[in-house]
Image (tube, rainbow, N blue to C red):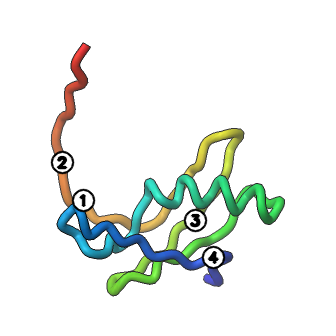
């Protein structure tokens, strides 16, 4: 698997120096690279200590990501009305 781009994400203010693989960042990066390269799908790699490949696809204005994941938090989130 050859990635089109390689990224790293650092968030020291959150208590996590480097996020292993960041879906939210790759949503933005997918949109950017799809427009920059004129393609709607490609592979990305996040080069943290754990590292991880993501399949990235732009469908309209939405980024669709897939890959292996690890559940770190599970629960229900309620938004106020």
> Of helix, strand and loop, which one carries label 1?
loop
> Which residue is denoted by mark 3 in the rendering?
55
* x, y percent for residue 71: 24, 59
**Labels 3 and 1 touching (C-beta < 8 A):** no
> Which residue is denoted by mark 1 in the rendering?
71
- Which label sits on residue 49? none
Disc 2 from disc 1: Cα separation: 7 Å
Look at 24% across and 24% down and name the residue there: 79
Q: How many marks?
A: 4
Q: Earlier in the sequence, mark 1 or mark 4?
A: 4
Outermost residue on the right side: it is 38
Look at 52% across and 68% down and name the residue there: 54
Compared to residue 38, the image places residue 76 above or below, namely: above
* x, y percent for residue 31: 65, 53
* x, y percent for residue 15: 18, 66
Whether residue 26 sits left or right of residue 4 in the image: it is: left
> Which residue is denoted by mark 4 in the rendering?
5
Q: Earlier in the sequence, mark 3 or mark 2?
A: 3
Disc 3 from disc 4: Cα separation: 11 Å
Whether residue 76 sits left or right of residue 28 in the image: it is: left
Neighbourhood count class around disc 4 (C-alpha, 10 Å): few under 14, some 14–19, many 20 upward: few
> Of helix, strand and loop, which one carries label 2?
loop
Q: Earlier in the sequence, mark 3 or mark 4?
A: 4
> Which residue is denoted by mark 2 in the rendering?
74
**Labels 3 and 4 touching (C-beta < 8 A):** no
Disc 4 from disc 2: Cα separation: 30 Å
Disc 1 from disc 4: Cα separation: 25 Å
Disc 3 from disc 1: Cα separation: 18 Å
**Labels 4 and 2 touching (C-beta < 8 A):** no
Look at 62% across and 71% down and name the residue there: 43
């Amino acid at each position: 698997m050859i990635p089109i781009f390689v990224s790293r994400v650092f968030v020291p203010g959150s208590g996590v120096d480097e996020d292993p693989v960041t879906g939210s960042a790759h949503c933005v990066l997918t949109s950017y690279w799809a427009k920059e390269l004129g393609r709607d799908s490609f592979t990305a790699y996040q080069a943290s200590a754990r590292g991880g490949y993501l399949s990235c696809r732009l469908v309209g204005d939405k980024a669709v990501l897939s890959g292996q994941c690890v559940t770190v938090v599970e629960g229900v989130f309620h938004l106020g009305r």
